[in-house]
Amino acid sequence: MGGDFGPRVTVPAALQALASNPRLKLLLVGDPEAISPLLANKNAEQLDRLQIIPAEHVVANDVKPSQAIRSSHGTSMRIALNLVKSGEAQACVSAGNTGVLMGLAKMMLKSIEGIERPALVTAIPNLKQQKTVILDLGANINCNSRMLVQFAIMGAVMAEDVAGVKNPRVALLNIGEEESKGLDNIREAAMTLRNSELINYIGYVEGNELLTGKTDVLVCDGFAGNVTLKTMEGTIRVILSLLKSPEGQKKKSSWLMKIFRKLLLKLIAKRFGHLNPDQHNGATLLGLRGIVIKSHGAANENAFKAAIDQAVQAVEKQVSEKIAVRLDAVLPKSE
Amino acid sequence: MGGDFGPRVTVPAALQALASNPRLKLLLVGDPEAISPLLANKNAEQLDRLQIIPAEHVVANDVKPSQAIRSSHGTSMRIALNLVKSGEAQACVSAGNTGVLMGLAKMMLKSIEGIERPALVTAIPNLKQQKTVILDLGANINCNSRMLVQFAIMGAVMAEDVAGVKNPRVALLNIGEEESKGLDNIREAAMTLRNSELINYIGYVEGNELLTGKTDVLVCDGFAGNVTLKTMEGTIRVILSLLKSPEGQKKKSSWLMKIFRKLLLKLIAKRFGHLNPDQHNGATLLGLRGIVIKSHGAANENAFKAAIDQAVQAVEKQVSEKIAVRLDAVLPKSE
């Protein structure tokens, strides 16, 4: 149990998740001395569905991923992934370092056949009251065209099964809509996707369409995906903060204005709540023989609980199994 | 006079600019038969400061830039750039195709010595009531580390002279703050910038800091820059549209609620007006021996006027000349 805040966030989040899902069982991998006190006097039925698995260390956040992976024996991340590998757990949720989680997960769980590199994916709400699945979000900063095509297939499965969209539209993130635009890998991936009857490919989409619902699946390399998602989050945070404390408006802060603002903030919270990083926390590491969910390192209790929920959903929907089947259909092994 | 709407947007914008700046003179390059009727019965003093330069064609928007450049003789874009080259004009403002404008401008005006490729740059308002200069926005989708360093230098000059920031902080856009993060070109540029005493380099900054004012200059390749700027614009548009017409809230649309919303929209307009693409329209093509401003193709009258204003400012501040001097100081030619 690493992440920026460790057990004092993840343990209460685990208890929340157990309370809201009576079928859930959780293994908490970490330092028993840090975890146990946080469980004192909690609901006995929930505690029955919870087990502490001791781990001596957490993965260091300040070293290179390759180095952290080499010295990962005995860390909570490695032990948790091992539980997935052995089948004792069906999913692993971590707030630790993305690069290390990605590397360790790939090493221990292996990729689904046909997937070169797993990708980080999330689903964000869009203007059409649906969700847009976006990947990769930072697991792979250099992607060839084959990887982008594999991301498209994985994203389509996520959109169908997790976001509930039929025949999801798949687009490539680019800096223009014309065919000639963009990097070579993107143009090459576009060619493959255009020719595939099993993918509902709609072409290039630009950053300004992230929230409009123009596409159900948005495919990009991990650098662009990270930039676009973080830019969106940052923009929303800035706007919310300006609305909450509009400087230079103090003279107008009569009680009436305060009520105005409160009402509108409510309205905004209702419309944008899901865009709040606290609520769409949890990116799935897709393409592995097992479910791994990456939480923001700085996730709070609600946000970490959202990541646990996402793991439950991925397990129930059998996402990994479906990706394997779909891959086989779109990119047959005989090719 | 190309762009998506041609003279019916650019001519009224030109008249607006002439009205607001009594020292400005404008050469309108385009089809006299399309332009002249739009000038009928307008202010005589303003018309005195305006001249029509006939051009038979506009650059085609639907062909590859390389092809459009080869067949650019007689186009308004080429004639306008020629006027800058010959010194008859001090700046060129265009709403035409970015790739063609970039290619033609580089071919005709040449780069400042020491600049490999010009970059598209703009300044966006941030939370600290300053502006953040961001480049490249899409002129160069593949950038080596030298180009990123040159962008940093050009961006610092823009921040000082156009945004008015002393000793501007310069950051590289990346997907994490740790030194080991990101693409090779970014890490290499970071090394050069860290070692330069003439650049106030502050490290990596992520997409969520675009509007917070954490840095005065944000340097990135044209792909990432385009993605982050468009994502920001799209997010703001979506939020404003939700605030303007909040579906599912119709029952509450009493007159009081309508007033609430109007007041808050005013407040938002005041705080975010500058983030509205209509008002910060106009990206400068920086690094050339002359001023070239790229307007959004779909710019409306106000937006195109903003692009003209930006050209005036760049000319007055002698941006090109200052970049040449600064380049020489940071990267002496003897190196």
Image (cartoon, coloured by chain):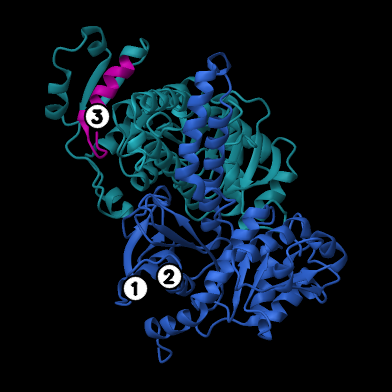
Chain colours: A blue, B cyan
Position of residue A233 measured from the top left corner of the image (x, y, whole percent): 54, 47
**Of residues A67 and A229, which is closer to you in this image?**
A229
Counting other residues with Cα less than 10 Å from the Cα at mark 1, is it few (<14), some (14-19), or many (20 or more)? Answer: many
Position of residue B80 measured from the top left corner of the image (x, y, whole percent): 30, 32
Q: Say what secondary structure mark 2 lies in.
A: helix
Q: Read off the residue under disc 1.
A: A199
Residue B77 belongs to magenta span: no
Q: Read off the residue under disc 3.
A: B9
Q: What residue sits 14% from the left and 29% below the top?
A: B34
Q: Is residue A224 left or right of residue B24?
A: right
- Same chain, marks 2 and 1? yes
Q: Which residues are magenta?
A: B1-18
Chain containing the residue with disc 3: B
Say which label, 2 or 1, has the lower sequence index. 2
Amino acid type, residue under disc 2 in the picture: Ala
Q: How many marks?
A: 3
Q: Read off the residue under disc 2.
A: A152
Position of residue B199 measured from the top left corner of the image (x, y, whole percent): 69, 37
Res B116 visible: no
State the image quarter where residue A57 is shown.
bottom right
Q: What residue sits 25% from the left and 17% below the top?
A: B50
**Of residues B222 and A326, which is closer to you in this image?**
A326
- Real-space CA distance between mark 2 and mark 3, rounded to the nearest whole angstrom: 40 Å
Residue A283 got which mark? none
- Same chain, marks 3 and 1? no
Amino acid type, residue under disc 3 in the picture: Val
- Real-space CA distance between mark 3 and mark 1, rounded to the nearest whole angstrom: 40 Å
